[in-house]
Image: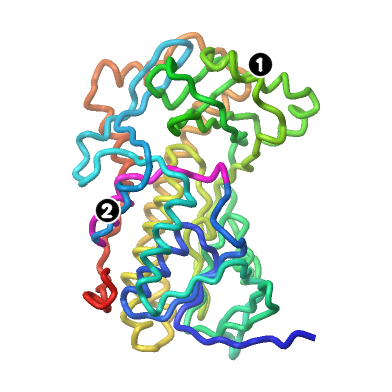
Amino acid sequence: MTQTRSLATGVCITGGGPCGVMLGVLLARAGVDAIVLEKYPDFFRDFRGDTVHPSTLELLYELGWLDDFLALRHDEFQTASVNIAGEPVQVADLSHLRTHCKFVALMPQWDFLNFLAQHGRRYPTFHLRMATEGIGLLASGGRVTGVRARSADGEVEISAKLVVGADGRHSTIRNLAGFAVKELGAPMDILWMRISKNATDPTMQLGWVRTGHMVILLDRGDYWQCAYLIPKGSFAALQAEGIDALRRGLAQTVPMLRDRVAQLDWSKVSMLDVRVDRLDLWHKPGLLCIGDAAHAMSPIGGIGINLAVQDAVATANILAETLRAGNSPGEAELQRIADRRMFPTKATQAFQTFVQDRAIAPLMAGAPVTAPPLAARLFDEFPWLRRLPARLIGVGVRPEHVRTPDAFAGAAGG
């Protein structure tokens, strides 16, 4: 029988997504011993959020890593438009943002995560354990004291001054802690797929809307990353209709794809169960949930990843000094994080649910779309209005800034 190993660290972070890895890197950079657990052996998962918004790019600038990041292969867009019933409408213009990068970068999430991990490994206190999944909580005296994890080499018990659940919308840590989840609902699910791109395709228009259908296209150079909205819970019925039903819906919504939809079969389609929820209580003694584990966001605006990264920055800013001193954060410190991040969470979800209820739910129910609605036409009539969604999408409600020091400046090359 394999013996359970034991480790000790300052903070154990479950979940190696952008939120968890960013937190681990920032804390390690500040001199805190941090272990990040990622249950998969690598970061390669297709059809994850691939947008890096100006707020996150600003953080990379503050860390001194922006030039290295932009040297990686990526695409960019500064304006966002929606094709509604055949008529394009520009709805966002990021050129007016007060950030160093006035665009959204499109990059596979695995490249972004590898970039963060590479920089994290410059610091001796950063430990990324791949193929290691948190499966249980250690506790003593009414306080969470660590994580029980499973890896290819057997189980390991990791004692920590703080456990952070950053393991996504289906968080194991959140469930183990018994936190109550407040469901806000969503009228749609999303099918993700790749469709090849032709040199004659028009300039990218993010959204395409026709009666009963909506498609989001992200330009990935030689292919389109395509998101096709379907009514909530209807995927099985669509599969029963056959792949031709999906092909027809795509071709009707985005006519330029008619000559390529035959490339699709069900093996090339991934379904995202859209959820919008949040915790009212984010912490208990020794444990904190952040990112999607604390608040699952709608894909509207592609804001979720960047909001989660902001959570990580706020957490590092508030807790780094306590953790570096070898102390366990108290409930008051953990509540400071929840208090600071709850407002942007609620404000962003309010925006997303408003769009879902007023626009997407009627569309999914078959409401006829014959022309852009008045609200969309106002963006053409008054271009300055495009700055409002640009601000919300590009920067967010309460952007965070790196306040933690680089404890290894010079020695780590950070």
Q: Name the spot of residue 133 as percent of width and height, x first.
A: 63, 69
Q: Which residues are magenta?
A: 46-63
Write down the quadrant of residue 262 in the picture. top right
SS for tag 2?
A: helix
Specify the quadrant that holds the N terminus: bottom right
Look at label 2 and name its amino acid. Leu
At 42% from the left and 43% from the top, the residue drawn is 107
Write down the quadrant of residue 232 in the picture. top right
Contact flag, marks 2 and 1 (Cβ < 8 Å): no
Q: Does residue 28 appear in this view?
A: yes
Q: Does residue 187 appear in this view?
A: no
Any mark on residue 66, and which? Answer: 2
- Whether 289 is drawn above or below 85: the answer is below
Any mark on residue 248, and which? Answer: 1
**Of the image marks 2 and 1, the number of the one nearer the N terminus:** 2
Write down the quadrant of residue 28 in the picture. bottom left
Specify the quadrant that holds the C terminus: bottom left
Q: Name the spot of residue 203 as percent of width and height, x first.
A: 37, 20
Tell me if mark 1 has few (under 14), some (14-19) or many (20+) residues whose alpha carbon lies within 10 angstroms of its own. Answer: some
15 within the magenta span: no
At 66% from the left and 73% from the top, the residue drawn is 151
Any mark on residue 181, and which? Answer: none
At 39% from the left and 15% from the top, the residue drawn is 88
Front position in the image: 30 or 69: 69
Q: Name the spot of residue 181 as percent of width and height, x first.
A: 59, 58
Tell me if mark 2 has few (under 14), some (14-19) or many (20+) residues whose alpha carbon lies within 10 angstroms of its own. Answer: some
